Image: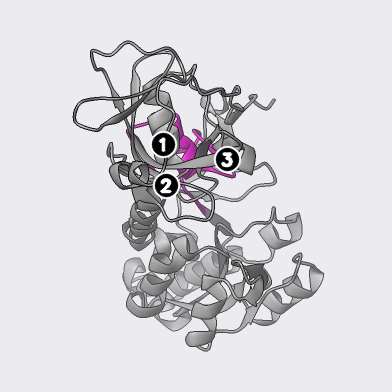
Amino acid sequence: MKAVFKRLFLCHFHCPNYPFTLILDNFKMRHLPYKIAFFGSDEIALPCLEFLHQESPQVEIRAVLTQPDRRVGRGRKMAQNAIKKWAQSKSIPCRSPEKPSSEECDWLREEKIDCILVMAYGHILRKSFLEVAPAGCYNLHASLLPSYRGASPIETAIAMGETTTGVTLMKVIPRMDAGPIVDSEAVSICPEDTGLILRSKIAQACVPLIKRKIECLVDGSVEYLSQDDSRSTYCRKLTKEDGQIDFAASSKLLADRIRAFQAWPGCSFPLNGQKIRIGSAESKDEEISLAAGETAVDSEGNFFIGTGNGLLLLKELQRPGGKMLKTADFLRGFDFPFGQVINSSPMNELLLPAKE
C-alpha cells in the first residue's frame, strides 16, 4: 500500500490545483475491481459470497480455497461442500487441498489477490497466507469477539443461555480469533432459536457488515479496535458426547442445550438400553415435585422430567431407527415407564480455560 500512497502524492504534487479527493477516486476507479480470495467450507458464508459476487462491483472473487470432498450421509458417498458447489456454479477457480500449502500461496500471488476473506474454513492459516495479499487477510467469526473465540461459537452461545451474539469482522493474526476488530453486527437470540436457526441469522448478518466495510478493507483505509483479552472466552469443537443430558442440571440449562445441539450432536437420554433423542424441550416451573431424572405425565398428556431446578417438558422424541415425533405420538407406540428415575452422567464443559 506504500506504493499506492506514493503515486497519489506524486499526482497531487504535479497537479496541486486538482482536488486530492478526485485524484483518490480516479485511482480507485482505475484499480477496480479489487481481487478477492475467499477461504471457507460452510454454507454459512453463502449470503456473503452472493453479495460480493452479485452486488459489489468494486470487488471480484478471483479464487476460492475450501476443504476437499468428504463422505457424507448413511451411504457415505463422496460429496462437495456448499462453497465448492457455489464456486463451480459461478465458474470461479477453486482449489480444495487437504491442507493449504506454499502451492496455494503461489497461486494467490499469480492471481494478484488484493485481499483474503475467511469464514468457517476449518484450518489455521500459516503466516505466509496472512502476508500474501497486500490489503491483508480478514475473518468473519460467528460471535461478538472477544467472547466465544474458537470452534463452536453459535451452538455454545445458545447453550450458555446468551440472548445476543453476532458476527465479527477481524484481521487474522497467528493467535486464534484474537486479531484486531474491524466491525461487528449484533444478532438477537430468541427463546425458540435452535443452532440451525441462529446459524441462518448470522449468515444473513454478514451481508450488511461486509457491505459497510469491504471497500475500506481492500483500499487500505480500514481502522481497527484491539480486543480486550481479559474478557475473552474460548469454545471447543463439539463431540458426540456433548449430546448427553445430566438431569441434575437446571431445566433452563438443559432446554438451552437441547435447542443448541438439535441438529448435531443431538441430546438424548438412556432408557432400558436404548438412546432416546430429544428433538425439542421447554423449561417449566410447574407445581409437580419430581426428583432429578424422575418422569411423569400430567392430566393433559404433557411429559415432564425432573431436574436439579425446575421441570423439563419434552415436546419431541425419537427412538433409535425411528422418526422424530411429537411426544404424544411417540408415547402412543412406546410403553414408557413413568415414575422411573432416569440415570444420567455429568456433562462436559463447553468453554475452555482462558489462554495466556
* Residue 57 appears anywhere in the view: yes
Q: Amino acid at mark 1?
A: Ile
Instruction: Based on the picture, tell me whether residue 50 belongs to the magenta stretch.
Output: no
* Residue 239 appears anywhere in the view: no
Residue linked to disc 3: 274
Q: Amino acid at mark 2?
A: Gly
Q: Secondary structure at mark 1?
A: helix
Rendering coords of residue 27 (x, y %) = 43, 76
**Disc 1 or disc 3, which is closer to the eye?**
3
Residue linked to disc 1: 158
Label 3: few (<14), some (14–19) or many (≥20) C-alpha neighbours in 10 Å: few
Disc with the residue nearer the chain's start (3 vs 2): 2
- Residue extending furthest bottom? 91
Residue linked to disc 2: 195
Judge whether 240 appears above or below 349 on screen.
below
How far apart marks 1 and 2 lie (CA) works out to 7 Å
- Residue extending furthest right? 102
Rendering coords of residue 54 (x, y %) = 35, 79
Q: Amino acid at mark 3?
A: Gln
Judging depth in this view, the residue of 220 and 303 nearest the camera is 303
Residue located at (49% from left, 16% from top): 248
Quadrant for the N terminus, please: bottom right
Q: Quadrant of residue 17?
A: bottom left
**Disc 3 or disc 2, which is closer to the eye?**
3
Horizontal side of 201 relative to 225 (left or right) equals left
Disc with the residue nearer the chain's start (1 vs 2): 1
- Residue extending furthest left? 300
Horizontal side of 13 relative to 37 (left or right) equals left
